[in-house]
């Protein structure tokens, strides 16, 4: 006797959106905005409104000492003066670009080199990582600027060290040929932050790639060029963007070492220092506001250029590009 079994198909249940879920999402959205409100209020009051105010002031002759009733709109006169009548503006641009072009690559090279040395398991490596990171904790502090000035003046410790080898040192911070070099050296010395980022990136490089390269007979240089550099290119790009923006914003060390003047002979007249001088020393706040907006546009343009060129040399392990 044949027994037949009937296979029952489980009933299909249509996916239904629970009633009230839309209201729940809206409630969560409102709650999110409530938690974000302190930041939004702070951003609006202390960032957005001052930015809009400075944009308006850039079209005026405001000097911060006169009453608001004496403020006059001058149109694009501040911008015209900047590009056609102010040689100090172009000198500040030259000094800033020279500083960035030299300091940023040297800082990244030092950070990457030290990260490669510290990317290994050895005794005391944690101590050395902290030691190399320590200068970055000081940041652009005023105290550090004074220490750097005392080290590189004519009677400073750097010249006393050179005297031990029979070398007569200069007054480095007071010499127009060397003053900017001391600022560059200070910037390069503070390579700890990008070094930590490089270390984190090196930890993510798969060991299997180095093993495969070794099987193919690759030496240390070949592994570095064919494995380390391509795998680290996104991290290098990230540090390059951050340090470029940071480098062009240098102010504190230039202010302290030059006494707020950009000397000697305007050799340390960074753009941000020149902006400060025009706004708070010469009391030309309208002109300083125009300088600030040109600086913002230049940094934005430079960032766009970096992102545009990154697609040609930044490689991602998933095969995608940076677009």
Image (cartoon, grey):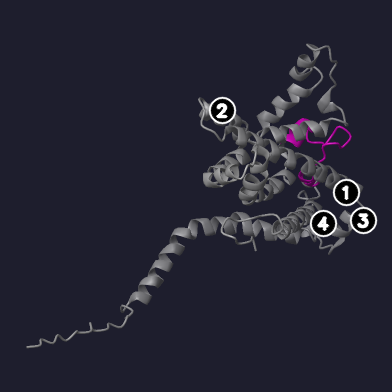
**Frontmost residue, 173 versus 185:** 185
Chain-order first, disc 3 or disc 1: 3
Cα distance in 3D space between marks 3 and 2: 51 Å
The residue labelled by disc 2 is 128
Residue lying at 60% horizontally and 54% vertically, measured from the top left:
46
Q: Is residue 183 above or below residue 45?
A: above
Q: Are marks 4 and 2 in contact (CB under 8 Å)?
A: no
Count of all numbered marks drawn on residues in the image: 4
Task: Using the image as rendered, state which of residue 220 and residue 13 is in the foreground.
Answer: 220
Say which mark, if any, is on residue 84: 3
**Marks 2 and 1: which is nearer the front?**
2
Determine the CA span between mark 4 and mark 2. 53 Å
Return the disc, 2 or 1, that comes first in the chain's sequence: 1
Chain part drawn in magenta: 253-278
Residue 118 in sight from this viewpoint? yes
Mark 3 or mark 2: which comes first in sequence? 3
Specify the quadrant of the image occupied by residue 104: top right
Q: Position of residue 306 (x, y in %)?
A: 72, 55
Q: CA distance from mark 3 to mark 1?
A: 10 Å
Label 4, label 3: how far apart the Cα atoms are: 17 Å
Label 2: which secondary element: helix
Q: Are marks 3 and 1 in contact (CB under 8 Å)?
A: no
- Residue projecting furthest to the front: 1
List the residue tagged with mark 1. Answer: 90
The quarter of the picture where residue 177 lies is top right
- Residue 275 is covered by the magenta coloring: yes
């Amino acid at each position: 006797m044949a027994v037949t079994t009937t296979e029952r198909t489980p009933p299909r249940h249509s996916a239904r959106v629970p009633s009230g879920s839309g209201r729940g999402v809206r409630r969560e959205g409102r709650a999110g905005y409530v938690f974000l409100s302190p930041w939004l209020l702070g951003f609006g009051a202390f960032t957005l409104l001052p930015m809009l105010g400075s944009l308006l002031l850039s079209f005026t002759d405001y000097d911060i000492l006169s009453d608001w009733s004496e403020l006059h709109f001058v149109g694009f006169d501040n911008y015209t003066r900047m590009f056609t009548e102010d040689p100090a503006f172009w000198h500040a641009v030259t000094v800033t670009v020279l500083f960035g072009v030299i300091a940023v690559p040297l800082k990244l090279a030092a950070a990457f080199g030290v990260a490669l040395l510290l990317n290994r398991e050895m005794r005391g490596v944690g101590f050395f990582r902290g030691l190399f990171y320590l200068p970055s904790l000081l940041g652009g502090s005023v105290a550090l600027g004074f220490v750097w000035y005392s080290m590189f003046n004519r009677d400073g410790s750097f010249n006393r060290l050179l005297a031990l080898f029979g070398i007569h040192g200069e007054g480095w911070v007071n010499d127009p040929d060397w003053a900017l070099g001391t600022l560059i050296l200070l910037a390069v010395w503070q390579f700890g932050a990008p070094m930590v980022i490089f270390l984190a990136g090196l930890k993510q490089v798969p060991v299997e790639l180095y093993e495969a390269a070794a099987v193919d007979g690759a030496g240390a240089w070949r592994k570095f060029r064919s494995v380390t550099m391509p795998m680290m290119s996104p991290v290098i790009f990230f540090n390059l963007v951050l340090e470029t923006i940071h480098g062009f914003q240098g102010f504190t060390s230039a202010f302290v070492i030059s006494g707020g003047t950009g000397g000697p002979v305007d050799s340390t007249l960074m753009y941000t220092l020149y902006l400060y001088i025009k706004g708070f020393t010469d009391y030309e706040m309208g002109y300083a506001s125009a300088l600030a907006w040109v600086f913002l546009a230049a940094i934005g343009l430079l960032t766009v250029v970096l992102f545009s060129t990154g697609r040609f040399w930044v490689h991602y392990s998933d095969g995608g590009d940076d677009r």
